[in-house]
Image: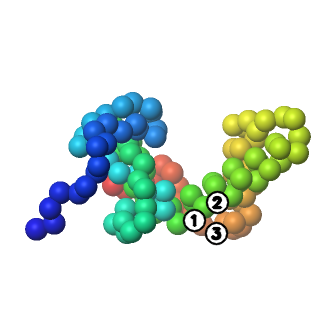
């Protein structure tokens, strides 16, 4: 009914989570916005099957844009200083931003995920 997708000559892709090269047919598409069904004008990243299975499939409304904003702000700050951003600084900024954004809202417990 739908026919094969045209993936060009791309036979292997790299998993964005672990860096493994896998055949495209054995990879899973990953959409940063969380809507892989809306395909128009998008380029998808890929995950190997193992990393895809480990991925949390809970809704993540606004998470990707928040992470991108934090990353961009940190890059601007590191350009104005000679010190590059660190993972710990990123995580600190993420926690502060999440607390501000969700100030007092009930957030799902990470241990109560249902699949």
Q: Which residue shows up at 64% across the image and 55% down it?
A: 68
> Residue sitting at 63 percent across and 54 percent down?
67
Label 3 element class = loop
- Separation of marks 1 and 3 at Cα, in angstroms: 15 Å
For the residues labelled 1 and 2, say whether their Cβ atoms are less than 8 Å apart. Answer: yes
Q: Is residue 44 above or below residue 79?
A: below
x, y (%) of residue 65?
60, 61
Name the residue that disc number 3 marks: 105
Report whether 37 appears left or right of 102.
left
Residue at the left extreme, as displayed: 1
Residue 93's disc number? none
What residue is pinned by disc 2? 66
Q: Earlier in the sequence, mark 2 or mark 3?
A: 2
The C terminus, quarter of image:
bottom left
Q: Which residue is mark 1?
A: 62
Q: Is residue 15 above or below residue 44?
A: above
Mark 2–mark 3 distance (CA, rounded to whole Å): 17 Å
The residue positioned farthest toward the front in the image shown? 9
Query: Does residue 99 sit above or below 19 in this rendering?
Result: below
In three-dimensional space, the C-alpha distance between marks 1 and 2, rounded to whole angstroms, equals 6 Å
Q: In the rendered image, is residue 67 in sight?
A: yes
User: In this view of the protein, which residue sits in the foreground, 74 or 80?
Assistant: 80
Of residue 59 and residue 19, the one placed in the foreground of this image is 19
Q: Residue at x 38, y 45 (%)?
A: 46
SS for callout 2: helix
């Amino acid at each position: 009914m739908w026919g094969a997708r045209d993936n060009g000559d791309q036979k292997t892709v790299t998993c964005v989570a672990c860096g493994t090269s896998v055949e495209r047919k054995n990879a899973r598409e990953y959409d940063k916005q969380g809507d892989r069904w809306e395909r128009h004008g998008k380029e998808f990243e890929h995950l190997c099957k193992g990393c895809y299975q480990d991925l949390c499939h809970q809704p993540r409304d606004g998470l990707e844009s928040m992470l991108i904003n934090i990353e961009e702000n940190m890059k601007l700050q590191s350009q104005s200083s000679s010190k590059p951003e660190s993972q710990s600084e990123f995580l600190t900024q993420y926690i502060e931003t999440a607390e501000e954004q969700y100030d007092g809202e009930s957030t799902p417990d990470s241990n109560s995920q249902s699949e």
